């Protein structure tokens, strides 16, 4: 069983400020790291799937980095906006097979204050 | 953009009853999943389904649970003899190989 941890559990950020939070995972038998954005009453939305050590991905004001050797990923949000308020989940698959189930972290609940 | 559709959005059932949660995955996706989140806890993997059979299942997915893809479009999760602790948000997801999952918006199951 994988242990995926996220910190902090919740975060209040002033509109316009930049922020980041962490996902940690076992560095052994690593296959991939997923980030999702989940707004209340909606479906979790895929942000990034990262597989290579040192990978950096970007989607608008959101970016993510991956360190598979030390077992962590950072998600960065630049110039936070109220619409960024959501729970951000990271997850890693049990195995490299196509039908792999994901182990999720508990999420970071981000609140952007106007 | 294609969506994964789940029905109903909220289901209330008596303890001991059977429930069927329904999902319509994205039509050209090959892998199908059920996850659940008990309030305040992590999202947990239940089962994956590929090529008309279960590929992987977690220890949560015991004999109380079953999945079916009866007609090539719907993907259902049946929970027999529901217990109070089965109350959770149940998410369906699908994907093509090598891409991220697409999740449905969930069915909130309340067992009373």
Image: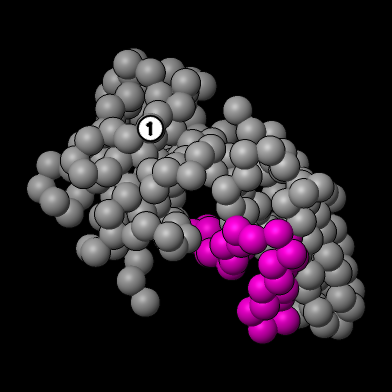
Q: Nearer the viewer, residue B25 or A15?
A: B25
Q: Quadrant of residue A18?
A: bottom right
Q: Is residue A53 above or below residue B91?
A: below
Residue designated by label 1 = B56
Q: Position of residue A16 (x, y in %)?
A: 86, 82
Q: Is residue B100 left or right of residue A110?
A: left
Residue at 42% x, 43% y is A97
Q: Quadrant of residue B98?
A: bottom left
- SS of the residue under disc 1: strand
Q: Nearer the viewer, residue B52 or A17?
A: B52
Residue A42 on the magenta segment: yes
Q: Position of residue A44 (x, y in %)?
A: 53, 58
Q: Nearer the viewer, residue A32 or B110?
A: A32
Report the quarter where the N terminus of chain B lies.
bottom left
The colour scheme used to paint the residues is: one colour
Residue located farthest toward the left when viewing the structure as drawn:
B71
Report the quarter where the C terminus of chain B lies.
top left
Return the chain for callout 1: B
Q: Is residue B64 left or right of residue A42?
A: left
Residue at 21% x, 44% y is B51
Q: Quadrant of residue B56?
A: top left
Packing grade of label 1 (10 A; few <14, some 14-19, many >=20) is some
Q: Position of residue B16 (x, y in %)?
A: 34, 16
Q: Is residue A110 visible?
A: no
Residue at 39% x, 48% y is A98
Residue A62 on the magenta segment: yes
Residue at 48% x, 44% y is A96
Provide the residue span drawn in magenta: A37-66
Q: Position of residue A95 (x, y in %)?
A: 50, 39
Q: Is residue B77 above or below residue B26?
A: above
Q: Is residue A54 visible?
A: yes
């Amino acid at each position: 069983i994988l242990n995926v941890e996220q910190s902090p559990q919740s975060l209040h950020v002033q509109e316009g400020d930049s922020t980041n939070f962490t996902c940690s995972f076992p560095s052994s038998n690593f296959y991939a790291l997923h980030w999702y954005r989940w707004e209340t009453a909606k479906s979790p939305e895929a942000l990034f799937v990262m597989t290579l050590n040192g990978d950096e991905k970007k989607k608008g004001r959101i970016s993510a980095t991956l360190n598979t050797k030390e077992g962590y990923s950072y998600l960065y949000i630049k110039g936070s906006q109220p619409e960024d308020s959501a729970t951000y989940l990271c997850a890693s698959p049990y195995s490299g097979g196509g039908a792999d189930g994901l182990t999720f972290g508990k999420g970071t609940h981000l609140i952007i204050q106007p | 953009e294609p969506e994964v559709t789940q029905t109903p959005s909220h289901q209330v059932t008596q303890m001991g009853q059977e429930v069927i949660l329904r999902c319509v995955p994205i039509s050209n996706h090959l892998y199908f999943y059920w996850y659940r989140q008990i309030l305040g806890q992590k999202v947990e993997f239940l089962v994956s389904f590929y090529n008309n059979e279960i590929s992987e299942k977690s220890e949560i997915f015991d004999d109380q649970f079953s999945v079916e893809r009866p007609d090539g479009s719907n993907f259902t999760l049946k929970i027999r003899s529901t217990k109070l602790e089965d109350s959770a948000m149940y998410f369906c997801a699908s994907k093509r190989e090598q891409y991220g999952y697409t999740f449905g918006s969930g069915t909130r199951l309340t067992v009373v």
